[in-house]
Image (cartoon, grey):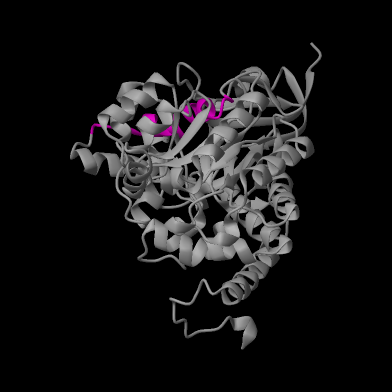
Amino acid sequence: MEKEVVDLLLVHALIVTQDEQRRIIPNGAIAIRDGKIIAVDSTSQLVPAYQASEVIDLTDQVVFPGLIDTHTHLFQVATKGLGEDMSVQDWVEAVTAPTAIHITPEEMYLFCLIGCLEHIHCGVTTLVDMSYMAHTFELHEENIRAIHDSGLRGRYTTIISDFGEEYGVLPQLIRPIDWFLDVYSRLRARYPDSDRMGIWMAIGAPWTISDDGLLRAMEYANRTGTRLVMHINENEVDNLLSQQRHGKNVIPFLNEVGFLRSDLLAVHCVVTDDKDIELLVKNDVKISYNPVSNMYLGSGIAPIIKMQRAGLTIGLGVDGAGSNNSQDMIETMKVAALLQKVNDRDASVVNAQQVLDWATRDGAKALGLEKEIGSLEVGKRADLFAVAINTPKIVPIHDPVASLVYSCGEENVVLTIADGKILMKDGIIQSFDEKKLIGDCQQAALGLANRCGSNRRLGRKWVSARNV
């Protein structure tokens, strides 16, 4: 019998498929061709049937679907360690907004690429990136180029802010709504929707957009089929300002004007009550749960278990490195579970399988990509990563899903593949000199922080070794 030719054959792995039945295949194999999964079965079944250009032996390794980060701000890699002990509003005004205002295209590419490489080390294959207002179109291009060059699957957004100076939005980040809509038209023309990249429309917060701007953005999204993203109720400020402006809380107001919809990704939703959840469910809004940044900024604990039980689709997000200090999706999975357990004082409210669902299947559904990614099944894109039994931290493995969520670290991730392309193998990034990029990032971040003053609260008394 003649063997079928494929590009890549992974063999002798323990495969956590995340399919409808949540099958786990011991000594399993995956055949990949043209970026898609051709077959998933036991090694004994696939080796006689397929001939591959490359065969990778994954003995003592566990393969999972690629993780899906539903919310980050890649450029914030430049701001790690600058936002300690600040609320969201203070931190944006003092750190991230000045960074966005002063960043150069070259710096944008470097910081976003470093953020993408950290995602790859953590098994992430898809992300939704929310950039701030860019003063030149080249900043958008360099941000998107970094995602593309990294090999990750991306959805790119840039924040609309035509309002809010009285609430602390820096005037350099505010433009008329027509200016933003023109930027989005140019982005959509330059980067038409594809399996690998898409342009979505982002609104920073309900208080960064005028009422007219919101209606105009909705009209544009409806007319062009553009999906929407918004930070909603990250803390109490959203409702407070909405009461001042509109006489009602944010989610009832957004429902009244028709902003709530099935293709809206609502980020954070920390300060969300039962009536809010009813409106989110009614409109099938998708939720991005960002537990680490919500803790780091003191925002609170999102009522995710209530949302889950009400039937909402939940995805996980690391948020930007400035409000997390890493882009570690594996850490985010663990914190996502522990935070809900401690909030309810009940260890049983969420288990490891549910958290992995949020990071894979449900994340894919939140992005409208459930037919393409989120599980290891025939016909889906070949997005996956492998965890090795190679450190005391992860050994022993009794339940591979629990081990990933509660015991794993990025040092255990040894292989990451997106769209059938090997991005990292044996823990080594394949397409870049990572050591050089890390050094370049360190120097560029120090220079940018000095230039824009985002480090003025640090009182740093050390200098980089390169400057000594």
The quarter of the displayed image where residue 303 is located: top left
Q: Quadrant of residue 155?
A: top right
Q: How many labels sit on residues? A: 0
Instruction: Mark yes or no: residue 61 visible.
Output: no
**Quadrant in the picture for the N terminus:** top right
- Where does residue 229 sit, x and y in percent of width and height? 53, 37
Q: Please identify the dominant SS of the magenta region.
A: helix
Is 299 left, or right, of 143 in this rendering?
left
Q: Start and end of the magenta stretch?
A: 348-369
Q: Nearer the viewer, residue 167 or 371?
A: 167
Q: Is residue 164 at least partly visible in the picture?
A: yes
Q: Estimate the x, y position of residue 363 in percent, counting from the top left.
A: 50, 31
Viewer-nearest residue: 409 or 248: 248
Work out which residue is located at the far top of the displayed protein and give it: 1
> What is the quadrant of the C terminus in the image?
bottom right
Q: Where residue 141 appears, x then y in whole percent?
A: 74, 50
Is residue 363 covered in magenta? yes
Give x and y (percent) for residue 79.
53, 64
The image quadrant of residue 225 is top right
Looking at the picture, does residue 401 appear above or below residue 370? below
At 25% from the left and 39% from the top, the residue drawn is 341
The answer to whether 129 is drawn above or below residue 314 in the figure is: below
Task: Give the farthest residue toward the bottom.
Answer: 468
Along the line of sight, the residue nearer the viewer: 118 or 79: 79
Position of 193 relative to 69 (above/below): above
Residue, x 59% and y 34% (percent of image)?
216
Residue drawn at x 32%, y 42% is: 243
Residue 415 in the magenta stretch? The answer is no
